[in-house]
Image: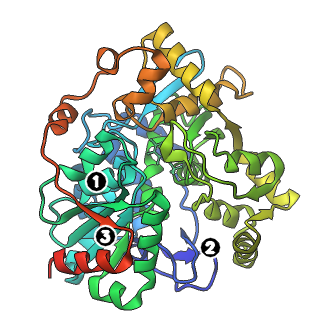
Amino acid sequence: MKYISTRGTAPVLDFEDTLLAGLATDGGLYVPESWPRLSRETLATFKDKSYAEVAYEVLQPFIGGTPDNDRFREILQSAYQAFEVPEVAPVVPLGGQHYLLELFHGPTLAFKDVAMQLLARLMDEALARRGRRATIIGATSGDTGGAAIEAFRGLENIDIFIFFPKGRVSDVQRKQMTTPTDSNVHALAIEGTFDDCQALVKDMFNDADFRQETGLAGVNSINWARVMAQTVYYFTASAQLGGPDKEIAFSVPTGNFGDIFAGYVAKQMGLPIAQLMIATNINDILARVLKTGIYEIGDVVASTSPSMDIQVSSNFERLLFEATGRNAGEVCRLMGELAEKRKFSLSPDVLDVMRASFAAERVDEVETAKIIKDMFETDEMLLDPHTAVGYGAALRSDLPTSTPIVTLATAHPAKFPASVEKACNRQAEEIIDTPERVQVMMKQDEKYETYPNELAGVQDFIRQKKTD
Ligand SMILES: *Cc1c(COP(=O)(O)O)cnc(C)c1O
């Protein structure tokens, strides 16, 4: 499989080069040259297969033979062994047409583990084959950093440096980054905001000498391999609920549009999907664009679902590319307009294409808290605030009651105990079933450095600490 950029001028790459490149050199995002299709007969076999076996069928066409098929199967087996339940991503009924897809059984209790565990192994493999090392750098507002560190810790060919805004991540999130003792892991608390951390990462990538000297690579959600890995659970969920003979809808708590774009990919590959519901919190740029056709960047407002507190939704560019009929020139024009005016308008045709697959709903803070409380009081079921946003949007869907609607449960409530406690008006310890491994982790010693928000100091730290 070859990969092309949404902006049309970056080199065409194979899978491994796309994996290691992250962003394309023309500023665009890589997408496969065409969507592989899975036959109905193939889809019908998925209900009897393990998660890793389905992953092999779904992902092999994107990999194109490097790593070879046997090795790829081994990598998949190993990646999903990191999960607490054998199904990896179980489907749980909520009553009526509603279901939850639990994506939080990985080591850091959020869905980002599902893709990161695979991405890390694929990168290490690609580097080993090339006799190269890489330095991963990444900024995090909370969940990505822990998932990345957990996935890359102890790998031979990679050092990882994660920057988080000092004092602005939850205790669980910080401990997940600062308790691993592996020598290739480095967590840095930056005296600044998440945006400052992201700017540091961007500046380092733009420093050509530094980039070359350290072999920088990125793992943020624009990396194609992350989106690719996330398509698998749409297939396994559908298979458990009567697919491919039945159309299923999905409601996806959305920030950077990576997770829900993976659902769109599954649909392009032939999975019968009735609707993809974009569920946003009060940072609702994606809900607004679907309703009005205008994509306009506002100010980020802090919410109880912080992993969705985003205004610029990077992966939306991939949908723009699709909805314009893969018109890279038009994507360049729209992204140029966005850079200049902080907004652009979609043509009615493009909007129609999007509305054929997607719906969108905004769920505010009051409603999110109410959903958490109601679910707890009526069903003794605890939802984390991100999942509650997804379920709130699912409840507003206008689909017939015969269509199952699956809400993606993107985090475990133990990751956001303060919000859950407040919504239910009960002590967190009394109601949240915190996994034992997390309880153990919370008592471990932390190791991290604090740095001012200055590029030079952070770069020196990386030069000193990276393995030669
Ligand atoms: C990252 C994250 C999201 C948003 O996912 P996107 O792919 O950025 O849309 C939702 N919920 C949780 C818990 C997350 O960590």
- Does residue 223 show up? no
Colour scheme: rainbow
Q: Earlier in the sequence, mark 3 or mark 1?
A: 1
- Look at mark 3 in the image and give the residue it sits on: 136
Residue 375 is at least partly visible in this image: yes
Q: Residues within 10 Å of mark 1 (few under 14, many from 20)?
A: many
What amino acid is found at the position of numbered circle 3 in the picture? Answer: Ile
Residue 76's label in the rendered image is 1
Is the residue marked 1 within 8 Å of ligand 1, measured from its CB?
A: no
Q: Earlier in the sequence, mark 2 or mark 1?
A: 2
**Crowding near pointer 2: few (<14 within 10 Å), some, many (20+)?**
many
Which labelled disc corresponds to residue 6? 2
Spot the residue most to the bottom.
209
Tell whether 204 sits left or right of 154: right
Question: Percent from the top left, x then y, of residue 37?
Answer: 55, 56
Residue 247 locus on image (x, y percent): 62, 34
Closer to viewer: mark 3 or mark 1: 3
